[in-house]
Amino acid sequence: MSTFHTKNADYIILGTGCAGLSLVMRMIRSGRFSDKKVLLIDKGPKTDNDRTWCYWEKQNGFFEEIVYKKWSSLNFFGPGFSTKLNISPYQYKMIRGIDFYRYCFGEITKQDNIEIVYGTVKDIGFQNNEVVVSINDEIIRIAGSIVFNSIYRPADADSDKAIRLLQHFKGWIIETDKPVFNPSGATLMDFRVRQDNGTTFGYILPISETKALVEYTLFSARLLSREQYDKWLKDYIENILKIDNYKVVYEEFGVIPMTNKRFRFYENGIYHIGTAGGQTKASSGYTFGFIQKQAQQIIDHLTAGKSLQSMAATPGRFRFYDTVLLRVLAEGKLGGDKIFTRLFQRNKTQAVFKFLDNETSIGEELKLISTLPTYPFLKAALHFG
């Protein structure tokens, strides 16, 4: 049985998904960590186009070089309200998983100070002031390293106020024999689908006039069967989008946690990043932008010689807003289709994006919240008061 000889690296990153790679890429780009030993641990190489990240952004971002497609406008279809959203100065951007992995690992393999070890991380603990990691059949004790963990493990509900919803989706990239899509505008939410299984909407990312990623997305507590996703996705394409001649060239499926569980950035000698560190927006499922903010903040603190535990936390009021919305959605007495329609119908899109990015002032938040139905949100808020 072999041992990992690099277990005492200066920095150890568990998981090479979006969060782990975003952090190590900033280490590389900064030029300040070339004399530090960095160890990356994951279950295996990233060779598949296993996901798509989408986010809005005003300027060119850290990963601008690998943005696969961007859109300057977004369509919204809700009950009694449909519009083309003006999102300027934002752009809605898409990065494919395979492009992200190739780009990051292409840079990582050039670095003599970074090593990658493949093995399944079965458990992470803390004993005798040391981080203890179980990898495959080995117990690895880590001493003197700064450890970042991006491996998310769902937890059981721990109180009657804990909410566990899921954002789950099935997507097909389809190709048509004639032009049917507008490549300059994506569809953020299309609520013309049936709402029988909870908040449900279509989502379209057109790549060209004849090619697009079309998704069927739900916010609910339970997943559907594979046959149900296929049935409703097919129904959306053929009966709502009115596309009857197409072929499926790729499919993807994803599940994103939507929970008010409190994630700790630092606990028992480990810094948690990405979804494992609470960087998935509970009320929307968006993650990529929050991961980038957290990764940059970590690098800024490390290069300035500041304690990572002094990093500013997200103001608690944003977590409260998310919790209230999750409870309203979980109770099902007010449909998400109506909530999001009110949100986009009565507010500028830029204000909504700023709010969902946790960047608004209290005054801006009160103005936006005042446009939502009062009673269900007040009732949900009092539950957590």
Image (cartoon, rainbow, N blue to C red):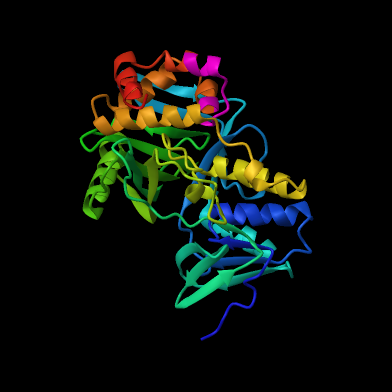
Residue 180, x across and y down, in percent:
41, 38
Q: Nearer the viewer, residue 41 or 265?
A: 265
Is residue 16 left or right of 311 when viewed as pictured? Answer: left
Is residue 61 left or right of 289 when viewed as pictured? Answer: right
Residue 371, x across and y down, in percent:
41, 14
Q: Residue at x 55, y 34 (%)?
A: 314
Q: How many marks?
A: 0
- Residue 300's quadrant in the figure? top right
Q: Residue at x 52, y 29 (%)?
A: 73
Q: Does residue 124 appear in this view?
A: yes
Residue 173, x across and y down, in percent:
41, 50
Is residue 204 left or right of 194 when viewed as pictured? Answer: right
Q: Nearer the viewer, residue 57 or 193?
A: 57
227 vs 262: above or below: below
45 vs 75: above or below: below
Which segment is the magenta one?
A: 354-366
369 vs 280: above or below: above
What secondary structure characterizes most of the magenta part?
Answer: helix
Q: Does residue 191 appear in this view?
A: no
Q: Residue at x 41, y 34 (%)?
A: 283
